[in-house]
Amino acid sequence: MAETVHTSCTGVETRLEIESEEDPSKIAKLARVSEAGCYVIQSLRNPTPISFQVSLNGQDLNLHSSEKPG
């Protein structure tokens, strides 16, 4: 490939649909706890350093070099 594949994200939307006879205040608390416990939402809101490593045949692969792994 000519290294022309790039991705981006313009936003993320989540929707929690609940059907229940329970008190709405209890459902609201459940929804807040669900949001707080969602690692995807929290990772997007509070960015975490990301490491990306590749190994080829048991050896680290330098993605920014045209040299063959040795």
Image (tube, helix red, strand yellow):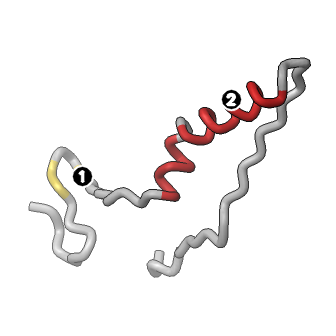
- Image location of residue 24, percent across then percent down: 83, 29
Viewer-nearest residue: 39 or 1: 39
Residue occupied by mark 2: 30
Residue 51 as seen in the image, left or right of residue 20: left
Query: Label for residue 56?
Result: 1
Seen in the picture, residue 39 relative to 45 is either above or below; the reply is above
Residue at the (27%, 55%) spot, across then down: 54
Residue 13 position by quadrant: bottom right
Tag 2 near tag 1, CB within 8 Å: no
Residue 51 as seen in the image, left or right of residue 35: left
State how far apart marks 2 and 1 are (Cα): 45 Å
Disc 1 on helix, strand or loop? strand
> Closer to the camera: disc 2 or disc 1?
2
User: How many circles with numbers are drawn on the protein?
Assistant: 2
Residue 59 as seen in the image, left or right of residue 15: left
Residue 14 as seen in the image, left or right of residue 65: right
- Image location of residue 25, percent across then percent down: 77, 30
Query: Label for residue 18?
Result: none
Seen in the picture, residue 70 relative to 34 is either above or below; the reply is below
Amino acid bearing label 1: Leu
